[in-house]
C-alpha cells in the first residue's frame, strides 16, 4: 500500500521503540530503512523492520551498550554489543569520518552485531564530507565458494564511495547471488528464488528460499567472485570477527575513510570524477533503451522520484504486521 | 624451450640493460618477470620483456627519473617519469611499506607509467612484512562497461593481500575478461581469443586479438563486475591519473598498506587467517578432483614446483627474440 514518507518513518520508529530502542536510536534505524525504501531496495526497507523485531525477540538477553575496545588516532574498534548493525555501523562511520577528517585516514572495525544494512548509506555519509570510503562486511558461512556447495563466507557486501561535483559515485554489492534479506522476504511472501542461486542443506541446487537459508547461496562472478568473497571474509577477521561467526550475531564490518588530499586535491578529484562519470554515461549504448550508467545513478534517480512524490509503496502484509507490532502486539 | 632459472633471469637482465636500465633496475624487472614465470603466468613473464623493449623503442624520448610529487607521513605520490611500471610499482611499494610500518597506514599513488605488472608481487612484498595491502590499477579505456561496446576503463587489476602463518592469501584479478599482455601474446603467437571476450573497433564481437586490442575487451561478472571496474578507474583518478589516460603511458596505480594492529593483533590475525584458510580448503568439493582453494594456493604450488625443478618452460619464439635483443639486435 501507499504510505506517506512521514507515516512510513513513524511506523518504523514506533516498532523500534517497542523493542527497546530510545528515540535517537529508533531514528537512526528509521533513516536507514527509509533510505532503502526511497532507493527501491524493498527487501532492505520497512520489511526489514519486521526482521529486526524478530531478531531482538529471538535473543533479547545479550544486548549491551556499544563499546570502544581499541582506539588510535586513525582507528577504532567497536564491540557492537549485539545491537542492530544499523546503529553500530552508524556509530563506526561517524567516528571514522571524524578521525579521517583530522588525520587524513581512518579505519573502523566492528563485530558482535547483526543486520549491518545498506553500505551505500555509510558511504554517502562519508562522500558528503568529501571523503573516499570503503566498506567490507562479513558474516556467517552462508555462501558456497567456487567448487563447493557448503557455505564458507557471508553474503559479504563490499562498497566503495567517491565524491564528485554532483551525486556521489557509490558501488555497493553483495558477493552472493542473493541477499539474506531478499531470501527472507521471498520466504515471507512465498516467492521462489531464481535458478542457480542456492543449494539446500543436502548440497543439491534449490529454488526454495527457506531451504536456501538453511543451505548456501551461490556467488556471482564464478571463481573470481568467490576469491573476492574470501578476501572480504578476511577483512571481517581484521575487524575482529570469528573464524566461524555465530549465525545470530554474525556480522563484522570493516570501514575505511580517506581524505583525497593525501594524494590529489579534493576539488581536482571531484572535478575528474564528474568528468569521467559523464564520459561513461555517453559511451555508445548497445541497446538505446539501456545506456551505460554509473554506480549509484539508478539509486539517486529512484530516490529523487520518491522524494518528489512524497510516498513509498510497501507490501500490505509488511505494513499490517508493523502496525500490529507498533500497537504492542506480536 | 626449457631454461634454467639463472639463464632465464640473465636473459631478461641483458635485454633490459640494452634499453637503458642500470643493473639495479634490470634486476628489479627481472625479479618481477621471473615471479610471473615461476607462477605459470606465461604472458607476464619473459614474453613481457619483449613488450618492454618494444615500448621503450616506440617512445624513447620521454623517460626521466621517478620523482616524488607529494608526500605526507602516511602518503606518497610518485610521477613515474614514463618508466616501466615494474620499477615505479616497486618503488611505491617500498616507500608505502616503510610509512605503514612507522605510522600504521600508508597510501601511494603512481601515474605516468606503463606495464605495472602482477600486483600479487607487490602484495607479497607487504604481506611478508605482516601488512595487509590493497592495489588498484587503472589504465586507458580498453574495457567496455556493461551496456556498451566502447571502452571506458582499463583492464583494471585489483588485488588484496593478507598475511597468515603460512603462505599469504592474495587475490589478484583483472576486471577484464582478457589481459592486455594475454591478448598481446595471443597476437604474437597467432592464437584466437575465446568467444565473448572482446569487441572490435566497429563495436562487433571479435575473437581476433589484434582487433580486440584496437577495440574493447569485455568485463567479467556482468554489471557488478563493470561497477567494480568503474570504481578501480576512480582509484586511478585518486592516484593522479587523467580522466582519459594516454594509451602509451597509461597506467595509474593506487596502493594501500596497513598494520593489522590498528584493529587486531598481528599474531591473532595471522592465526585466524590460517584457520579460516584451512576451513575453506576442507569444504566438501562438488568435484573431488577440484577441491575449493584459497586465492594464491595455485600460484604458491606452481612456484614451489618450478623452484624445486630449477627450470621454466618458455616459448621458443620468445627466447630467440630475447637472445637477439640481448646480443644488440632489433
Image (cartoon, coloured by chain):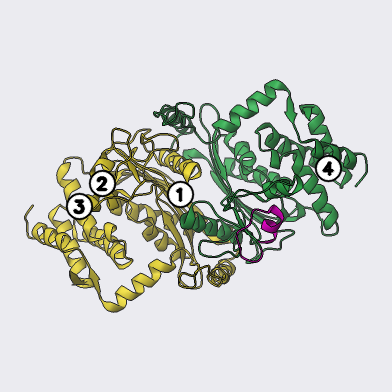
Chain colours: A yellow, B green
The residue that mark 3 highlights is A190
* CA distance for labels 1 and 2: 35 Å
Residue at left 86%, top 47%? B19
What's drawn in magenta, residue-wise? B201-215
Q: Nearer the viewer, residue A106 or A171?
A: A171
Q: Secondary structure at mark 1?
A: strand
Q: Nearer the viewer, residue B35 or B144?
A: B144
* CA distance for labels 2 and 3: 9 Å
Nearer to us: label 3 or label 4: 3
* CA distance for labels 1 and 3: 40 Å
**First-in-chain label (2 vs 3):** 3
Q: Position of residue A96 (x, y in %)?
A: 42, 54
Q: Secondary structure at mark 3?
A: loop
Q: Answer whether residue A176 is magenta in the image.
A: no
Please, which chain is the residue tagged with disc 3 on? A
**First-in-chain label (1 vs 3):** 1
Q: Are marks 3 and 4 in contact (CB under 8 Å)?
A: no
Q: Secondary structure at mark 2?
A: helix
* CA distance for labels 3 and 4: 65 Å
**First-in-chain label (1 vs 2):** 1
* CA distance for labels 4 and 1: 41 Å
Nearer to us: label 1 or label 3: 3
- Picture quarter containing residue A149? top left
The residue that mark 2 highlights is A209
The residue that mark 4 highlights is B16
Amino acid at each position: 500500500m501507499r504510505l506517506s514518507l512521514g507515516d512510513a518513518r513513524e511506523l518504523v520508529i514506533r516498532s523500534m521503540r517497542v523493542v527497546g530502542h530510545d528515540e535517537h536510536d529508533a531514528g537512526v534505524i528509521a533513516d536507514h530503512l527509509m533510505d532503502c525504501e526511497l532507493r527501491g531496495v524493498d527487501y532492505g526497507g520497512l520489511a526489514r523492520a519486521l526482521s529486526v523485531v524478530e531478531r531482538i525477540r529471538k535473543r533479547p538477553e545479550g544486548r549491551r551498550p556499544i563499546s570502544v575496545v581499541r582506539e588510535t588516532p586513525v582507528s577504532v574498534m567497536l564491540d557492537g554489543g549485539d545491537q542492530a548493525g544499523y546503529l553500530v555501523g552508524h556509530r563506526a562511520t561517524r567516528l571514522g569520518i571524524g578521525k579521517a577528517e583530522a588525520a587524513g585516514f581512518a579505519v573502523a572495525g566492528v563485530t558482535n552485531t547483526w543486520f549491518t544494512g545498506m553500505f551505500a548509506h555509510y558511504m554517502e555519509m562519508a562522500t558528503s564530507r568529501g571523503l573516499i570510503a570503503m566498506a567490507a562486511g562479513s558474516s556467517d558461512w552462508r555462501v558456497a565458494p567456487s567448487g563447493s556447495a557448503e557455505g564458507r563466507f557471508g553474503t559479504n557486501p563490499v562498497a566503495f564511495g567517491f565524491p564528485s561535483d554532483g551525486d556521489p559515485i557509490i558501488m555497493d554489492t553483495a558477493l552472493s547471488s542473493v541477499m539474506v534479506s531478499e531470501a527472507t522476504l521471498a520466504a515471507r511472501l512465498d516467492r521462489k528464488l531464481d535458478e542457480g542461486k542456492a543449494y539446500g542443506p543436502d548440497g543439491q541446487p534449490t529454488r526454495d528460499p527457506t531451504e536456501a537459508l538453511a543451505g548456501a547461496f551461490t556467488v556471482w562472478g564464478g571463481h573470481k567472485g568467490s576469491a573476492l568473497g574470501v578476501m572480504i571474509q578476511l577483512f571481517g577477521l581484521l575487524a575482529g570477527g570469528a573464524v566461524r561467526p555465530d549465525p545470530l550475531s554474525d556480522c563484522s564490518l570493516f570501514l575505511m575513510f580517506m581524505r583525497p588530499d593525501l594524494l590529489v586535491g579534493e576539488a581536482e578529484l571531484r572535478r575528474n570524477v564528474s568528468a569521467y562519470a559523464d564520459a561513461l554515461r555517453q559511451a555508445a549504448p548497445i541497446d538505446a533503451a539501456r545506456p551505460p550508467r554509473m554506480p549509484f545513478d539508478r539509486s539517486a534517480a529512484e530516490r529523487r522520484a520518491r522524494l518528489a512524490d512524497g510516498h513509498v509503496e510497501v507490501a500490505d502484509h509488511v505494513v499490517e504486521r508493523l502496525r500490529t507490532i507498533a500497537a504492542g502486539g506480536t
